[in-house]
Amino acid sequence: MHNWRRSELALGRVSKRNGNMMPTASNMLKLKYNCELEVKARDHSRKCVPTESDPATRPNTEENIYVVAKSDVPNRVAAIELGVKAWWKKVRKDKPIGPALIFRDHHQSQPIRKFTKMAWATTSKIGCAVRDCGSNYVVVCHYSPGGNIVGQQIYSPGTPCGSCPVNAQCSRKEGLCVLP
């Protein structure tokens, strides 16, 4: 779910609110699933709260949370799919990111931050959990190393895989840099 969206972004197939396309990405890493991040996401999801965990408890890790009524989805898989779609579509619903693709101070409190956590080029690991919380499912995903760093570029625009790290291979079909 995440890598497909990152690939679409890297290949220039993601539109902004104004209908223009986001630029292609030259340094977008392919995410690898990480069980330690899943455990941390699971631990927070068990609290059944719709708020992010204390950043001090997850150094260098970003977090997205989504709550969905169980009556709106058939199962946990559908809950996480809905959460991922909701986070990603913030790029089409929120104020657009500027052409320099810089994460600004004001983005920290805007819904677009959910999209940028998923789209941060140098994030390489992900772990997610879904918790049954009575009438709702709580979806939590953790991303590491965390992005959303004020003053930094979300990703480098350019030819897909044009700026992959030295130790990475290029998946041309996906436009993603694959770390060993």
Image: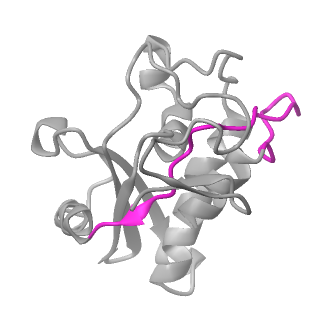
> Eyeballing the image, is 126 above or below 24?
below
Q: Position of residue 50 (x, y in %)?
A: 33, 52
Instruction: Determine the image quadrant of residue 24.
Output: top right
Residue drawn at x 24%, y 61% as measured from the top left? 37
Residue drawn at x 48%, y 78% as measured from the top left? 70
Give the position of the N terminus as an image quadrant: bottom right
> Eyeballing the image, is 130 above or below 166?
below
Tell me, yes or no, whether the highlighted magenta stretch contains residue 31.
yes
Q: Position of residue 126 (x, y in %)?
A: 37, 59
Which residue range is magenta in the image?
Answer: 12-34
Residue closest to the eye, 99 or 53: 99
Residue closest to the eye, 90 or 51: 90
Q: In the drawing, does residue 55 fall left or right of residue 123?
A: left
Tell me, yes or no, whether the highlighted magenta stretch contains residue 107.
no
Q: Position of residue 139 (x, y in %)?
A: 39, 65
Residue drawn at x 43%, y 57% as measured from the top left? 179
Residue at the outermost left position: 57
Q: Position of residue 169 (x, y in %)?
A: 53, 57
Looking at the picture, the colour scheme in use is: one colour
> Eyeballing the image, is 14 above or below 70?
above
Residue at the outermost front position: 166
Q: Name the chief secondary structure element in magenta.
A: loop
The mark tally for this picture is 0
Residue drawn at x 52%, y 22% as measured from the top left? 153
Residue at the outermost right position: 19
Give the position of the C terminus as an image quadrant: bottom left
Residue closest to the eye, 27 or 107: 27
Q: In the drawing, does residue 44 fall left or right of residue 95?
A: left
Instruction: Determine the image quadrant of residue 85.
Output: bottom right
Q: In the drawing, does residue 163 fall left or right of residue 140?
A: right
